[in-house]
Amino acid sequence: MSKQYVVRVMGKEYNVSVEEVSPGKFKVKVDGYELEVESPIMAGVTTTAKPATTTATETKPSGKPERREEKPAPTSAPAAQPTTPAPAPTPAAKPAVPTPAGGAVVEAPVPGKILKVLVQPGQRVTKRTVIITLESMKMELEIYPPKDGVVKEIRVKPGDFVNTGDVLAIIE
């Protein structure tokens, strides 16, 4: 039986699955990459490596995650080492955002922080209406809709950090 975790490392979440293959040997999957790791066995007791992050979420069958704090256990045994080098996780492909019929999606042109959201759903806008102010590299960028229309949805709020291509708003 494998345990499922969502682990956050430097603000990015990874899906992790840990399955004990035999005493002291584990199969670990991180976002699709599989590793076999070993943990030392001392006096018939198997010690397991603790996650390297300070928080982990264990997925329960109910679908509702349970938060718990993980603290590294003091041990004289070395941490589990992968038997093969772990490939660097690749960013997950963003799900395609369906463009509403006759509508348009407003995406972040650069990574940055949302400073202001200047419109609300239901508000009529033109191609010259500033809808969002985004800060990137100490510059303020004004974000305009690609067409005239009505704001259907705003998907960000002031203080949010966005990456290039993240959906900010939908215009009908």
Image (tube, grey):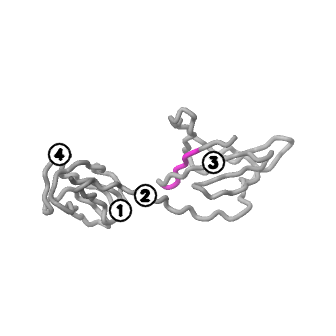
Residue 7 part of the magenta segment: yes
Which residue does the numbered mark 2 point to in the structure image?
Answer: 94
Closer to the camera: disc 2 or disc 3? Answer: 2
Residue plotted at (76% across, 49% down): 76
Closer to the camera: disc 4 or disc 3? Answer: 4
Residue reaching furthest top? 62
* Front one among 131 and 153: 153
- Distance from label 4 to label 1 (Cα)? 23 Å
State the extent of the magenta-drawn residues as a range: 5-10
Q: Is residue 62 left or right of residue 107?
A: right
Residue reaching furthest right? 43
Circle 1: residue type: Gly
Which residue does the numbered mark 3 point to in the structure image?
Answer: 17
Residue plotted at (53% across, 54% down): 9
Res 114 quadrant in image: bottom left
Q: Secondary structure at mark 2?
A: loop
* Front one among 86 and 171: 171
Residue plotted at (28% across, 61% down): 135
If you read the primary sequence from the N terminus, does the residue marked by circle 3 or circle 1 appear first? 3
- In the rendered view, tell whether residue 113 sits above or below residue 152: below
- Distance from label 2 to label 1 (Cα)? 9 Å
Which residue does the numbered mark 1 point to in the structure image?
Answer: 165
In percent of width and height, residue 27 lies at 71, 51
If you read the primary sequence from the N terminus, does the residue marked by circle 2 or circle 4 appear first? 2
Which residue does the numbered mark 4 point to in the structure image?
Answer: 122
Circle 2: residue type: Lys
